[in-house]
Structures are given as C-alpha cells and as structure tokens.
Image: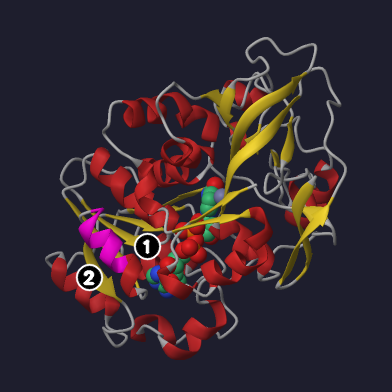
C-alpha cells in the first residue's frame, strides 16, 4: 500500500509499505477513505517530537471501511463504516474504567520509552512518536486498528466523511479543551489559536454556556472563520503591538477573561514569536527558544481564580510562569483527549444538525499530494486551515 512516512524534519514522503494484517484477535483492518492532517502532525514535521524513526507511517485522524475482522471482535463486521479515535484504549484497565482513555495502561507497547523520556506512559497513539508506541498511522491506504471493540464508532447512514471525520480528534479535542476550562454560564472565554482545535474549542465554549468568546491569532483567514463561523470576537495579536494583556483586561472590566484555552502548542511561535511579538508583561523573562509563549500569555491574562485549559501539545519541557500561576490561584488542566468519552455525544450533535464540523475544511487532496499539503498547512499558504487526504 501507499503510506505517508516521516524521514526527518521537513521531510515526509509517500512510500510503498506492506499492507497491514490482523495481528491480534481484537484487531480490525480498515480501508482508509478520508484522513486529515493535524496540528500535532506539524510538530512531527517540524522535528519537535523526540523518538521518531525514519520510515514511520504517520497520521492519526482516519476513517474508513472495515475490510478484515479479528476473531475476537464483536461490535464490528466487514463493510462497516467507522471513524477511528487517535487514542488507542483497551477499555478495561484502571484508567479506561475512569474514562481516562488517553492514559490507557495497555496500548503503548513501549511504555518504558515514555517513562524514560517523559516520566509517564500515555496510551498508544497512531502515527506518532515511539513515546506513544510507534504504532503505524492512518495517512495510508490501510490501517490496522487494535482494540477495535473499544475505539471506532460506526457512522450512521446519511452523514458524509467530511461531517464525521473530525470525531477522530479535533472536535473532541476542542470540546474537552472547553470542558476542562470549567466554563460557568455567561463567562468570558479567551481562546489562543484559531487553528482547527481553536475553532472547535470556540464552538464548544458556546455549547458549554460561555457568554462571550474572544479568539486570538494572527492569521486573517483563521480570525475571519472564528468571527463569522464560530461567532467569536477576535484579536490579531500582531496588530495590538504587544498590548494583548491590556486589551483583554480592558475588554473584561479590568479582571481578565474568566477562562483561557491554549490551542496553540509547540509549533506556533516558539522562537519567532518571542523575537517579534513579545507581550510587554511577559517580555522580561521570555526567551527566544521558549515554546510556551501562548501558555504564558494565558497565565498572565487570565483573571485571578480562573482556569487555563491547554489542549496544545508539548513534547518537551519549557519555562512556565509558575509564580503568576500560583499567586493568581489559577487552575491548569491539560492532556491528550479522551476521545472515546466524547464519540457518542458529539456524534449526536452532528446527527441533530447542532454542528456540521465540515466547515473547517479548506483543502482536499489525494494521498500522493500529502508532502505538499504538509507545507501548505504549516505555512498557512492559500489560506489553508484544514487538509483532508483521500487515499
Ligand atoms: P495549528 O497549528 O493549525 O493552529 C495553531 C494556531 O495557533 C495557528 O493558527 C497559529 O497562527 C496560532 N498561534 C501561534 N502562536 C500564537 C500565539 N502566540 N497566540 C495565539 N495564536 C497563536 O494547529 P491545530 O491543529 O489547531 O492544533 C493546535 C494544538 O492542539 C497543537 O499543539 C496540536 O498538537 C494540539 N492538539 C492537541 C490534542 C490533544 O489531544 N490535546 C489533539 C489534537 C491537537
Ligand atoms: Zn490530531
């Protein structure tokens, strides 16, 4: 089969690989019909994630048709159309029992790698680093899906791939990002990052009762989508000349937003942001190589006693403003998304017409064009916000 493989920083290629096969009785193999590129994939592309190997098949936002079924699978049969969550969960360990699916104890085949490198072992994740198991990913013609009775959700008739694909990751991720923000009815929520995760965090903040949502980015097309589609007030942080805190404070009676969501992660402005768009209050201690820029802005801007939710991904340490975090009495919540927890309720929202997640798609391309689309997405060329690949 054809599959997108990682070969180093800025180097992804479509290579030929053996088709995946059933390895465990609880596996299925799907023929991938749609598979998206995620901001998390950009962290791999940018070389920010340790423990990648040349030739790894990447991608973790897939859906498709069940082709082969292991003897122990009871919920799925050949021909079923399914969306596959990016987190792989066994469904019966202590963590899965608490619905902490992305912390499953049994699906990362190399947890010792994670323990050495990060001090903990997350669940297995498709197409990500060997920290999360080195499990072949879904930007490919076929995908082996372990624990197939626990993860994939069947798609009801009448819904397109484009409507349901983002249940694999970014819709639940935006939703958990908003849920972790602990929004009380009528509160003001500020969202850093208007990429795909930020857009779904904004939409979810409204669903969870926000009275006001303020979205922050510097990409005009993303800000336009946040305003027009997701109904947020917007701030282009490059245009406010280092006065983001003052502006947010002025907009909120001098207190700051009640709840802040960091949907930026490592890719973003790391080094370049620190050089060009430093917020004055943060400037004193900010270093050029610090990728926690947006998180620190959120810590500085959030009102006392507020909450910061951080779906943004970090695979390395950084310098976090612990003093303000502590002295302002802030709560910080983060983590990989427990996707399985949200599949049924969010599928219902799509079926009822409350949300149509396809609004996020700006580009659709064949798998063969994936290397070009990684560049397009990373560099925000051609107003790119979300790419769907069709293997
Ligand atoms: P993306 O790269 O498309 O979007 C990030 C956005 O942040 C961009 O629009 C960029 O212009 C903006 N940005 C950069 N610096 C900023 C700053 N200082 N202030 C405000 N905005 C800034 O990525 P995405 O797909 O939307 O993903 C966002 C993050 O969420 C990534 O870190 C990704 O890895 C992470 N993610 C987490 C999970 C999870 O389970 N927790 C799942 C999926 C994605
Ligand atoms: Zn993703």
Quadrant of the rendering where the N terminus is positioned: top right
- Stretch in magenta: 223-230
From the viewer's perspective, tell me whether residue 344 is left or right of residue 199.
right
Give the image location of residue 213, x and y in percent: 23, 56
Residue at x 79%, y 17% (from the top left corner): 70
User: Is 335 in front, or is 382?
Assistant: 382
Residue at x 58%, y 65% (from the top left corner): 373
Note whether ligand 1 is within 8 Å of mark 1: yes
Real-space CA distance between mark 2 and mark 1, rounded to the nearest whole angstrom: 17 Å
227 part of magenta stretch: yes
226 part of magenta stretch: yes
Give the image location of residue 157, x and y in percent: 43, 21
Q: Secondary structure at mark 1?
A: loop
Whether residue 292 is visible, yes or no, is yes
> Which residue in the rendered view is the most extreme toward the left?
253
Where is mark 1, residue-wise? 194
Residue at x 44%, y 24% (from the top left corner): 344
Q: Is residue 184 above or below residue 50?
A: above
N-term-proximal mark, 2 vs 1? 1
User: Is 154 in front, or is 8?
Assistant: 154
Give the image location of residue 304, x and y in percent: 28, 59
Where is mark 2, residue-wise? 248
Q: Is residue 131 above or below residue 319?
A: above
Q: Is residue 377 above or below residue 241?
A: above
Closer to the eye: label 2 or 1: 1
């Amino acid at each position: 089969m054809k599959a997108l493989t990682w070969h180093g920083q800025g180097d992804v290629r479509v290579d030929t690989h053996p088709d995946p096969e059933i390895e465990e009785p609880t596996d299925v193999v799907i023929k991938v019909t749609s598979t998206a590129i995620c901001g998390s994939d950009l962290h791999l592309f940018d070389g920010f994630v340790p423990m990648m190997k040349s030739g790894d098949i990447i991608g973790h936002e897939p859906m498709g048709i069940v082709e082969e079924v292991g003897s122990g699978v009871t919920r799925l049969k050949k021909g079923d159309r399914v969306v596959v969550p990016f987190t792989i969960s066994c469904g019966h360990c202590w963590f899965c029992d608490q619905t902490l699916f992305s912390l499953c104890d049994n699906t990362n085949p190399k947890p010792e790698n994670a323990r050495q490198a990060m001090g903990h072992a997350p669940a297995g994740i498709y197409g990500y680093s060997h920290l999360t198991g080195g499990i072949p990913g879904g930007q490919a013609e076929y995908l082996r899906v372990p624990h197939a009775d626990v993860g994939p959700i069947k798609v009801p008739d009448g819904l397109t791939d484009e409507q349901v694909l983002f249940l694999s990751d970014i819709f639940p991720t935006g939703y958990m990002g908003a849920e972790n923000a602990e929004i009380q009815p009528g509160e003001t929520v500020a969202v850093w990052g208007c990429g795909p995760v930020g857009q779904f965090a904004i939409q979810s903040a409204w669903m969870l009762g926000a009275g006001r949502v303020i979205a922050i980015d510097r990409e005009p097309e993303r800000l336009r989508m946040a305003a027009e589609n997701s109904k947020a007030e917007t701030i282009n942080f490059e245009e406010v000349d280092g006065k983001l805190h003052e502006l947010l404070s002025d907009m909120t009676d001098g207190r700051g937003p009640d709840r802040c969501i960091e949907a930026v992660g490592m890719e973003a402005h790391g080094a370049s942001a620190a050089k060009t768009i430093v917020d004055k209050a943060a400037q004193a201690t900010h270093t050029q190589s610090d990728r926690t820029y947006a998180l620190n802005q959120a810590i500085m801007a959030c009102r006392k006693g507020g909450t910061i939710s951080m779906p943004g991904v970090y695979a390395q340490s950084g310098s976090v403003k612990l003093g303000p975090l502590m002295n302002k009495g802030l709560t910080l919540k983060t983590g990989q998304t427990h996707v399985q927890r949200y599949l049924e309720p969010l599928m219902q929202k799509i079926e009822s017409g409350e949300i149509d997640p396809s609004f996020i798609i700006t580009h659709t391309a064949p798998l063969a064009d994936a290397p070009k689309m990684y560049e397009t997405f990373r560099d925000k060329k051609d107003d790119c916000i979300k790419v769907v690949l069709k293997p």
